[in-house]
Amino acid sequence: MQLLLATFSFALVTSITPGPNNLMLLASGANFGFRRTIPHMVGIALGMVVLLLCILAGLGTLFMQFPVAQTALKIVGAAYLLWLAWKIAFAPVGELKGKETAQPMTWWQALLFQFVNPKAWMMALSAVSSFTLAGEQYWLSGLALVGVFAVVNLPSVSVWAGFGVGIQHCLSSAQRQRYFNGIMGFLTALTILMMVY
């Protein structure tokens, strides 16, 4: 029971604190509303479950055996985060027509993003190494860990989309939307520092 409570606390703190996922959800909630951001939120939650299962199955040991793989992931993750930051910062604002209409991230894009998201890797590797039991109880404790993240992650990330919806009234002009998107893009790019330190 004590391990379960510790796992719950870890999952809650790591899921609800700022990071690339939550900053993108804040921007998505503000730009697209809560309902259109739901697939993005679901993709994050599913992506964390898949990432945890992969690490439980041994993917995390790849980094120990081949440190160059971790470096490669950091480079790919940084490049992708910069591209996302650019897309957020320069997202179309105001009245949009035709093909220029911006779209929120899909569930599968959000799922795949977890595999290049440095915070997601940190969360998953730390969780598996800290909250699983050795020996015969490894998979049982590992599946319990995945279950806790499945329950905690979606409501936690939903809070950020809700914050975005809450500030929509402050973004009543195209100029304010541009400033907001620029700030969100900049903050998303700053999360690359998490990969360095």
Image (spheres, rainbow, N blue to C red):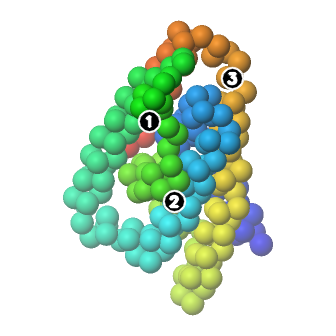
Task: Give coordinates of residue 180: x percent, y percent.
Answer: 54, 19
Which residue type carries mark 3? Answer: Ile
Q: Number of callouts in the render?
A: 3
Q: How far apart are the two marked residues, 2 and 1, measured between alpha carbons?
A: 19 Å
Q: Earlier in the sequence, mark 1 or mark 3?
A: 3
**How crowded is the residue under tag 2: few (<14 C-alpha within 10 Å), some, or many (20+)?**
many
Residue, far bottom = 136
Location of the N terminus by quadrant is: bottom right
In contact (CB < 8 Å): disc 2 and disc 1: no
Q: Nearer the viewer, residue 67 or 99?
A: 99
Badge number at residue 191: 1
The residue that mark 2 highlights is 47
Please name the residue shown 64% across and 62% down the image.
149
> Hey, which quadrant is residue 94 in on the image?
top right
The answer to whether residue 6 is visible is no
Along the horizontal axis of the image, is 116 left or right of 8?
left
Q: How far apart are the two marked residues, 2 and 3, measured between alpha carbons?
A: 27 Å
Q: How far apart are the two marked residues, 1 and 3, measured between alpha carbons?
A: 22 Å
The residue that mark 3 highlights is 167
Q: Earlier in the sequence, mark 2 or mark 1?
A: 2
